[in-house]
Amino acid sequence: MSGKRVKKIDIHIHTMPTSMMVRPNGENFALPHELTTMYEEIGIEKGLLLPSGVYGDGAGDVMSMREAVQMVKEHPAIFGWWFCGLAPESGRNSPHEDLSFYLNQLKAHGAKGLGELVYNRTFDEDPFLLNLLKHCELCDLPVTIHIGNRYNDYGVVDELGLPRLEHVLQMFPKLKILGHSQKFWAEISSDVTEKSRNGYPKGKVIPGRVPALLKRYPNLFGDMSAGSGWNAIERDREYSWKFMEEFQDQLLYGTDICSPKQTAFFRDGLANFLDESMEKGKISYKAYYKICRGNALYLLDGAKTNIEGIENG
């Protein structure tokens, strides 16, 4: 069954109120007025704002939670939701702190989850991170994680094969985790190596740890944003159609736009591939709709969708 193209929900977007600092490459985040134009061209309705670097290793220019709340209020046409950030050491700097006390206040201000979590620590061993994850589970707040290497990198630390991610999924079975980054998506194929996990490996996919974990843990979701998400899908399209069909309830479209110069990459990449895959009958309309927007609306608002794409609360 094919149908009309839908406006997508972006599960992973960063911005800033104004340009203040640039990265070493001279670029900075797209500002709201730039994102408005980019979203229109890419085919996105609105996005989930992740306050980049609220807390965490590897942060440059940062956005406070107050700014995130204000951003959503001032630009409701492009930012429909926001995730919060909370330092694991909040309160009394104790791994036993009741972080639910703070997280529930952030929920009252509209936070729909936490992330992007980029602390460069082993997140299945660090007592502070474990406490934060425990309270996110208690507060029913999904968490977007960026998986990285230890040092000279950012993101929660995991090794080849994602053993720590699996451990965390087992420890917190009711915590919804959105996996993201090269180290996550390279594991779509079992031929990943220590070297290739740091980049964008090519070639046919031999189903690896990501599909295995998605199958085993319904609380794991795939954040398909950035070059890493697109590369995982684009490298073996025949496999990707099967992958998207099988895990249609756990995959979410996203961009991770980090510069106003990236319109063409996101327009011509994953967004176009999803549209054309549906139109050519490579994936069902049901899978297409869920990945493009249905799963995001369910995760963020609890809105359920039927095959025609009618959203119901």
Image: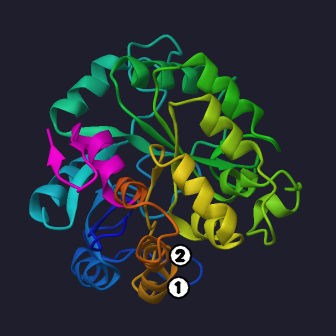
User: Percent from the top left, x then y, of residue 185?
Assistant: 67, 56
Q: Gap between marks 1 and 2, in whole Å?
A: 5 Å
Q: Which residue is mark 1?
A: 26
**Residue 207 appears left or right of 305:** right
41 within the magenta span: no
Q: Nearer the viewer, residue 168 or 274?
A: 274
User: Percent from the top left, x then y, of residue 144?
Assistant: 48, 44
Residue 93 in view, yes or no: yes
Magenta stretch in the rendered image: 292-313
Q: From what the image shows, is residue 88 above or below residue 268?
A: above
Which kind of residue does numbered mark 2 sit on? Arg
Q: Which residue is mark 2?
A: 23
Q: Are marks 1 and 2 in contact (CB under 8 Å)?
A: yes
Residue 157 in view, yes or no: no
On the image, which quarter does residue 99 sit in?
top left
> Quadrant where the C terminus lies?
top left
Judged from this view, the residue extending furthest toward the front is 1
